[in-house]
Amino acid sequence: MSVARLPVGDIGQDPRSSRQAAPPVLGFLIEDKARTIQPHNDALVVTLGIRGYDVKRVMVDQGSAVEIMYPDLFKGLNLTLDDLTPYCSPLVSFEGRVVTPKGQIFLPVQTGSEVVEVDFIVVDVYSPYTAIIARPWLHTLGAVSSTLH
């Protein structure tokens, strides 16, 4: 996964104090498209370290506000309902159906050398993905994802 990062120090600085510094550039290089077949409009699906395991088929969804864990991953991590804390707000699935979550759980998610604690909402519905990682994770990393790259 190609990720562009903004320098943290540039956010919220007084623009008058940084007139001499070059503005941060948010972008990707042609080389970042290596090993992709163009043109495409595929979902961004990655492998991430979750709770110490390499977890495949994790979809990065910039349009979602919550991180979701599906049954295959829940069972694969040997989690039980006792590991969950209550989550009382219903969700709406891709098909428009209301889904009642089983609960939520905080788990470490590693990408590269960075580890972020993620609050997964656990649902018991079918998905071709094991999990969905969303805006809260991207914002915590200070990352921008690119489906093109």
Image (cartoon, helix red, strand yellow):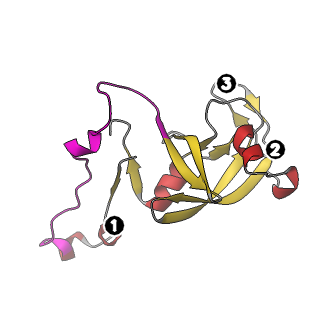
* Residue wearing tag 2: 102
The location of residue 103, given as percent across then percent down, is 79, 49
Q: In front of the other: label 1 or label 2? A: 2
The location of residue 89, given as percent across then percent down, is 76, 44
Q: Earlier in the sequence, mark 3 or mark 2?
A: 3
In the picture provided, is 120 more to the left or to the right than 36? Answer: right
At label 3, which amino acid type do we have? Answer: Gly
* Residue wearing tag 3: 96
Single out the residue that lies furthest toward the bottom: 17
Q: Residues within 10 Å of mark 2 (few under 14, many from 20)?
A: some
Is the stretch drawn in magenta largely helix, strand or loop?
loop
Magenta stretch: give its range. 18-45
In the picture provided, is 125 more to the left or to the right than 111? Answer: right
* Residue wearing tag 1: 11
The residue sitting at 51% across, 49% down in the picture is 135
**The residue tagged with tag 3: helix, strand or loop?**
loop
Cα separation, mark 3 vs mark 1, equals: 37 Å
Single out the residue that lies furthest toward the right: 82
Viewport quadrant of the C terminus: top left
